[in-house]
Amino acid sequence: MHFNAPVIVALSGGADSVALLAALVALGYDCRAAHCNFHLRGNESNRDMLHCQELCKAIGNDLYVIDFDVKARMEQTGESVEMACRGLRYDWFRKLADRDGAQAIAVGHHKEDRAETFMLNLMRGAGIIGLTSMNVRSGDVIRPLLSLSRKDIEEYLDRKNLSFVNDSSNSSDLHRRNRIRNSIFPMLEQAFPGALDAVLKSISNLEAAREIYLEAVNNIAQKYTEADNSIKLADLSALPQAQTILFEMLKGHGFKFPQICDMISSVGQSGSEFFSPDGSTVAELSHGIIHLVDAATRQKNPDFAIKVNPCRSIFDPIRIDITLHAVENFSPSQHGAMEACFDADFVSEPATWEIRHYRRGDRIVPFGSSKSKLISDIFSNAKFSQEQKRNAWILTRNGIPVWIPGLRNSAEGALGPSTTKYYKMSYIHNT
């Protein structure tokens, strides 16, 4: 860290956060203490807030305070009390950091916290990343006290003659972390003296192995990632470690392991969609390929349509050059569905012509056929991704698709024995 940018310091009033703030202030950092009042412990919650105010006043430090409605958050998100409080405070810390241009958010985690987190994640069945998740720096969060014990911290406060408050809920085994702190670790220490240090040593060993693991995962992931960042799931799923590799590739988007398993089990299906828990990203599965799409930018309105004059060239939303010709000058197109020819009478008759995107149930009569076909089947046969399907344009006459520029011509309005003139439409696709 550097001294010329502020630091947001999470201040609960407990020993570790008080020591953290005092140490950073003594070192000369521009600290902005932030206290959350969750109002979960009645008068004790207000006591903690008052203690933080008195401490900051005594040391001449700024203090921000906020009141939270934890119950409302839980009802909105379905989170536990612990997760709701965590989400509320870190969301607020980051807003403060953005507003004040802070270089980091400092929290007072210490050695015992790290060991407890390891045990919690172990009981959840976490992998190597989860077991080493509490680091000195994790993104914008720093933990300067991580190498110190609770005893070290209290001795520092005693030397500085600084007081702190105790959270009475810490003595209750209602929360899992408390059960580990109050029951499991004391039993481990009794049965295996030095258990805490052994756990911390294991974390250090795993951290070294983690770097090797991440490098290996990255090397494998690159082999199954296309230039547009799509993932070749069909090929990847053949690997025995496919679930682990895909999880590491997608966890940055928030996808959970059960979703990864569902993706792999659905590899033979096209059209499946998987939404990240926060709804920000969609993993679209098409023909064994996963495309990651920003949910906010996905086309939500496939009914969007623009009326056009089929006798004049079209420049928006796509370019289609339109020319009128005598039938004796007709010759079969060498450009496939990039060109479409329609009888002039079919075009000139009163009708509503539009260019729009695909709608569920759309059908077209392919050139050379007398039966209609679902456009969704045409897309599938062309191995279109979900994004390509959304972005494909369709020319319609009175609501009936008559041309999919660049993909399929229609039998509607085709030239026949009575045709004297025809319109040629040329799709100019800018690549």
Image: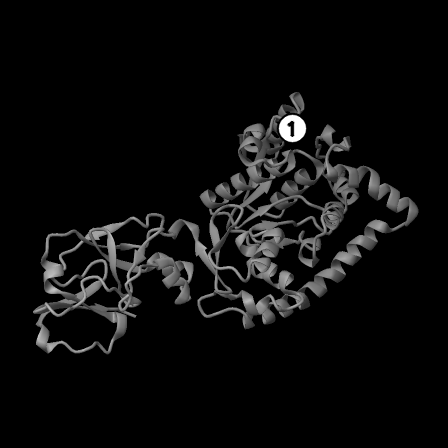
Up the image or down, 431 lies above or below 176; here it is below
State whether residue 323 appears in this view.
Answer: no
Q: Looking at the picture, how far across and down is residue 136, in whole percent? A: 65, 53
Q: Is residue 152 above or below residue 239?
A: above
Q: Which residue lies furthest to the top in this view?
A: 43
Residue at left 71%, top 54%? Answer: 131
Marks counted in the figure total 1
Coloring basis for residues: one colour
Residue under numbered circle 1: 48
For residue 258, side relative to residue 289 (left or right): right
Residue located 60% across and 37% down the image: 79
Quadrant (top left/top right/bottom left/bottom right) for the C terminus: bottom left
Q: Which residue is drawn at 87% across and 46% down?
A: 188
- At x 66% / y 39%, what residue is drawn? 17
**Residue nearer the viewer, 91 or 425:** 425
Residue 265: image quadrant is: bottom right
Vertical comparison of 57 with 360: above or below: above
Query: Visible in this render: residue 404?
Result: yes
Q: Please state which amino acid type lies under the numbered disc 1.
A: Asp
Quadrant, the N terminus = bottom right
Q: Is residue 328 left or right of residue 274?
A: left
Q: How crowded is mark 1: few (under 14 residues within 10 Å), some or many (20 or more)?
A: many
Looking at the image, which is closer to me, 22 or 186? 186
Depth check: 93 or 284 in front?
284
